[in-house]
Image (cartoon, rainbow, N blue to C red):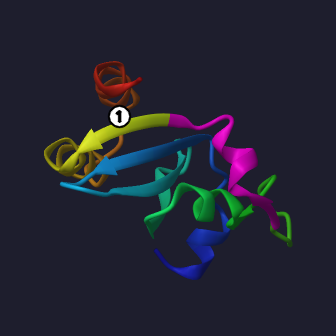
Amino acid sequence: MNQRQAQKIIPSTWIMIEKQNNSTSDYILYAIDWKRKARWSWEGWNDLADLLQFNIPVRRKLGSPNYSSQPCAKIAKKAIVLRMNEQQYDRFEMLLYKPFSKKKWNSFLKEYRQ
């Protein structure tokens, strides 16, 4: 995604995933903009407390020149929380990078929502 496209993203769905490995958990945050068929992800967090303190840039409306940043803890309140193992996460990633369909997403989320 180029810089111009990234400036147009206004997230409408937030998904927080706890990916469980053999002994540890990784935390990943996804922002999805259904209208523009775009997504952002923040990966590589091993500690939930560190992720919740991270400030995430969020655009409030299209055409706005500035981003405002919010702590992830504020976003996590409205995020969909999913707990997955590695196989489930691989399936999630395959679904994420195919063309978007809200119907497929809703059926997937019903299956894995906690």
Q: Position of residue 97 (x, y in %)?
A: 28, 55
Q: Position of residue 50 (x, y in %)?
A: 61, 65
Residue pointed to by mark 1: 101
- As rendered, which of 59 and 37 lies closer to the eye? 59
Q: Position of residue 9 (x, y in %)?
A: 62, 59
Label tally = 1
What residue lies at 52% left-to-right and 33% top-to-bottom?
Answer: 80
Q: From this viewpoint, which residue is outermost toward the left? A: 87
- As rendered, which of 91 and 3 lies closer to the eye? 91
Is 50 placed left or right of 60 in the picture?
left
Examine the rendered structure and indicate whether residue 4 appears above or below residue 61: below
Examine the rendered structure and indicate whether residue 111 appears above or below residue 27: above
Of helix, strand and loop, which one carries label 1?
loop
Q: From this viewpoint, which residue is outermost toward the bottom? A: 3
Mark 1 Cα-neighbour bin, 10 Å: few <14, some 14–19, many ≥20? few
What residue lies at 30% left-to-right and 21% top-to-bottom?
Answer: 107
Examine the rendered structure and indicate whether residue 65 appears above or below residue 14: below
Is 114 placed left or right of 35 in the picture?
left
Quadrant in the picture for residue 55: bottom right
Quadrant in the picture for residue 58: bottom right
Is 98 placed left or right of 52 in the picture?
left
Q: Position of residue 103 (x, y in %)?
A: 35, 23
Quadrant in the picture for residue 112: top left
Queried whether the magenta region covers residue 77, the answer comes back as yes
What residue lies at 59% left-to-right and 61% top-to-bottom?
Answer: 51
Queried whether the magenta region covers residue 29, the answer comes back as no
The quarter of the image holding the C terminus is top left
Q: Amino acid at mark 1?
A: Ser
Write down the region rendered in magenta: 68-80
